[in-house]
Image (cartoon, grey):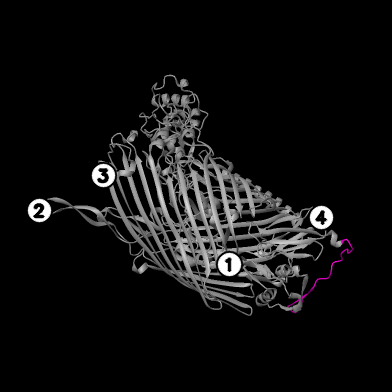
Amino acid sequence: MQTNFNQRARAVCLGAFCKLLVKLYLILFCSLTFALGTETGLSQDAKIAITSEKSISVKQVFRLIHKQTGYKFIFSNAYLKDAPYVTLNKGVIKTKDLLDNCLSPLNLDFEFTDSQTIVVQRKKPVAQRVNSDTKRDQFTISGMVTDADGAPLPGANIIEKGTTNGTQTDFDGNFTLNVSDAQAVIIVSYIGFATKEIPLNGSTSVSVSLEEDAAGLEEVVVVAYGTVKKSDLTGAVSSIKTDEINATPSARLDDALRGKVSGVQITPTSSQPGAAASIRIRGTNSITGNSSPLFVIDGLIGAGNSADINVQDIESVEVLKDASATALYGSRGSAGVVLITTKRGKAGQSRFTYDAYTTFQSPTRFIDVLNASEFADWQNEVQGTEAYPDPSSYGEGTNWQEEIYRNGAPMTSHTLSASGGNEKAQYFVSGNYFNQEGVFTGGNLKRYQFRVNGDYKLNKILKVGNSVTLSRSTTVPRSSNIINIAGWFPTLPVKDENGEYTIQTASAELSAENPVGAAAKNVNLDTRTRILGTIYAELEPLKNLRYKINYGTDLSLDKSEDYAPSTLFSQANDRGTATIANSEYLSVLLEQTLTYSQTLGEHSFDGLLGYTRQRIFNSGSSVQTRGFTTDYFTYNNIDAGSERTGASSFANEFGVESFLFRLNYAYKGKYRVTLNGRVDGSSNFAKDSKWGTFPSVAVAWNAGREKFIENLSLFDDLKFRASYGRLGNPASGGTSLARLGAGFTYLFGNSGDITNGIGLNRLGNDQLKFETTDQLDLGLDTSFFNDRLQVTLDYYHKKTKDLFTDQEILWITGVPTAIIPTNFGTIENSGFELFVNSINVDKGDFRWDTSFNISTNKNKVVSIPDEDGELLINRIGGVVNIPSAVIKEGEPLGAFYGYIRDGIWNSQEEIDASGLEGRGVFPGGKRFRDISGPDGVPDGIIDNNDQTVIGSPHPDLFGGMDNTITYKNFEFSMYWSFVLGNDIFNETDAWLNTAFDNNVSARFADRWTPTNTETSVPSARGVFRTELVPETGIIEDGSFLRLRNLSLGYNIPSDKLPIFQSAKVYVRGTNLLLFDNYSGYDPEINRGDENARRGYDQAQDPAVRSYTLGLSLTF
């Protein structure tokens, strides 16, 4: 029997949320309707692909347009005599916009004819007042034109409004122009950037910063092993640019992406500095296998989600979600792929950038517990003694959370970068220092990082390059066990009258150590040195044919050093314990690809063939000693310990060899087909199961280019996508293989001596094979109002079968580990993703942009070939040691499993009248519902038969909304994120409030007593550990709405900066507001990254609110 106890409450929340979305949509739609008007683009315009940044002549621009569109040009050579070169940025631009930018500064106009011909001619003269004072009245201005980052824009057009009087910027972005008077207005334009009108208002010096124009220059998206125009995408890909990434100050990329990408749920696992988040793309699709996305950094596969990459070095992040987008990563692409592209140099003048910020962090909130006098009264009742004769004398006592967590913990970052080059060599170099103090006392992360990216053209056919990062970080790990902080005795001070840290010996539930003293005395240090880099060579022996070889390596050296001093109460017998652990990780990747592209009339295609080989080596060792005569040496002289209590080492190796292919075909630019796939051979499997094939197919129809759609004058773009494919998931290193181990002792010879030996400690399974995920994706991309409103909608369905799990075997097999890896079971994920981007207002100096995303995901276990189609998991421990979750057919993975609470038993008479017996049946105890018995019907006994599904950790909806407003030199942004419909298993609360000898939640001040029966809080008897069972009272709503980011910046005009090209100052707040109903520290929780243990709040630290002051300089 199954009961959804939250169904009614969730329906109310969902209904209210949907109403809110409808209101937001109507407001947005109305504002768009009035702000945008009825502008539409020229339907006859074709789009021109610019494959790389370059400067070419106007005639070469004509040839480029002719090659891609078939348009022919009629013009006089005299028109183009002495015409300056035109600088083109990489991307896609409409033919009309390209010609406008090229010809307007030359006083030339153009006209499309019906015969696929473009006629270029002189502009008709504009009537101007001419008199003898004209020369005398001229007004000379000068200035500079840059992009948003302060880089100069050579070849930008500056025209006096209402005239044909104009000029272009030089190589350094500078210009000089004589205008008619001091009140003139100049128009500044550049290909791929939004045009600006600047009133002079008497100023002789003008500084202009242009923003990229989404309507003028179509986005180029990084995909697996290449790039593609966004309009040509056949797969589901989300792209995030550097400005969005840097909107959140953080040591990690995942913090910056939370809530910004449709279909991607990012949940923090700890507020400890540098701690990784849990990331799921389109749901959880494995039980024990990997469900985290594959990270690829500058082409290096498996580089990982770590704090070793400076987020300010990142140019863009692409999230690949469907089978078509991820198929080229084969057996490692089923959980999605995150492509990280770092910044590279551009030809032009050297540019230096300095970015710095200082942030102050504080916990967002604490758990409310009993104060000292309330605790004393509570203990008297629980213990049944007068341990605290005068409870009121203790007053408020010590709030241990306030003592251990600090307000205003600083975080600072300094990044200095340089970039530039010429046509043959470009470079990007950066250095970063990052220092973050944790909100937990003593916690800290320091990182030093250096990056060198370079591209070098050796000759006409050969190009080489590199991407190398060197980093070193030190971490002082500090993470709480909240029971030993919030639950510690509030009646004790931090230090006694002698200045020594207090201890407690009355509670068996709590650590004897004072939490502040333990944080101050323990010595911990984790050190990591990492080299992450790739080098490549690219050869183009024939036109459109390219061969590329790429070599990458990822080397990490980790060291963990810990010392527990003899002054700790827990070390009274051990007299100090030192532990040192070292590990080494090395990944080596070699890739070779061959690409070819060709256009034949209205047909175009490109293909890719590739071979990759990757080896991963991992080894480590550790040693522990105790019994130190002095704490002076800590872990620096581990031999000083009198007793070695542990020593171990390990080594393993993993390899994958792959063949990959891709074929793209397009007809008339309207109909597209993509076939791609990968064949992987993995060392994790036995000979007959080593190889797996992972193909996909995708089609796209650019319906917006059909005449009957163009004639509607409604869509700027309308594209339908569909893809289907199979992806994989490899088992972890050596999982399918039998394992040998040491430590098996036996008698040797006649002497009876015990000798160590080796033997099997785990059986293998030569039938184990890849998990496979079949995924269908249906997508729609459309835009309106000259691309000012862009919408992307996707539906997906994923089915993962042959799930990895460990199956128990009989002990008589003789191996210590009585489990064997196997494939069984099937999981489905399906849902919708919506992304909307709009330019709401763009008038003069004012612009307002909005982006919004919302996603759904339904996770369901389809089949479990186990007894009764369910598997009970996640024992919560304690005396009862019973499961708290279930893997059950028809339910989401890891659904919470327990009893349904129906209030509190108020009297023995009420109990007698019910006829119930069993768990919790006593006055003041939790009243559980009798829903079943051994025969499947209620039997009057509260026992394990009455457990059922009581919640799900998977949300119904999640997403975010970002609003950015710019006015003149000011920038304002506000970003909200939300989650709706998930449940949280508040294990922290359960453990805190079911122990009789530690502090408990403040709500126990209103506990049940014979004279206080109108309460939902159980009696003192109900807090004993024997009463700790999974039940609906522990399950809480995890829905929330959060103001994640609020920012205000100011771009200082360059004419006020004698040294710098650009400067920006900003203030920013993070996690400023939270609307939720959760009683714990924060509803965004996930302890660890286990697939079947999601949604558990297990002693997680508080979330962090921060305030930042930042500065960015370009010179």
Cα separation between marks 1 and 4: 39 Å
Please tell me whether residue 985 is drawn above or below residue 294 in the rendered image: above
Q: Earlier in the sequence, mark 1 or mark 3?
A: 1
Mark 3 residue crowding within 10 angstroms, few (<14) / some (14–19) / many (20+): some
Check disc 4 and report the residue beneath it.
183
Q: Which one is nearer the viewer's eye here, 935 or 678?
A: 678
Q: Which residue is mark 3?
A: 644
Q: Earlier in the sequence, mark 4 or mark 3?
A: 4
Residue at x 88%, y 61% (from the top left corner): 133
Count of marks placed on residues: 4
Q: Can residue 1082 be spotted in the picture?
A: no
Q: Residue at x 73, y 55 (%)?
A: 205
Comparing 636 with 250, the one in front is 636
960 over 496 or under it: above or below: below
- Mark in the foreground, 1 or 3: 1
In three-dimensional space, the C-alpha distance between marks 1 and 2, rounded to whole angstroms, equals 81 Å
Q: Does residue 122 show up magenta in the picture?
A: yes
The residue under label 3 is which amino acid type? Arg
User: Measured from the top left, where is residue 1044 in percent x and y?
Assistant: 58, 46
In the rendered structure, which disc, 4 or 2, sits on the residue that comes first in sequence? 4
Distance CA(mark 4)–CA(mark 3): 85 Å
Residue 750's label in the rendered image is 2
Q: Amino acid at mark 1?
A: Asn
Q: Residue tagged by mark 1?
A: 422
Residue 1006 against residue 684 in the figure, above or below: above
Amino acid found under the numbered disc labelled 4: Gln
Q: Is residue 807 left or right of residue 293?
A: left
* Quadrant (top left/top right/bottom left/bottom right) for the C terminus: bottom right
What's drawn in magenta, residue-wise?
Answer: 113-133
Q: Secondary structure at mark 3?
A: strand
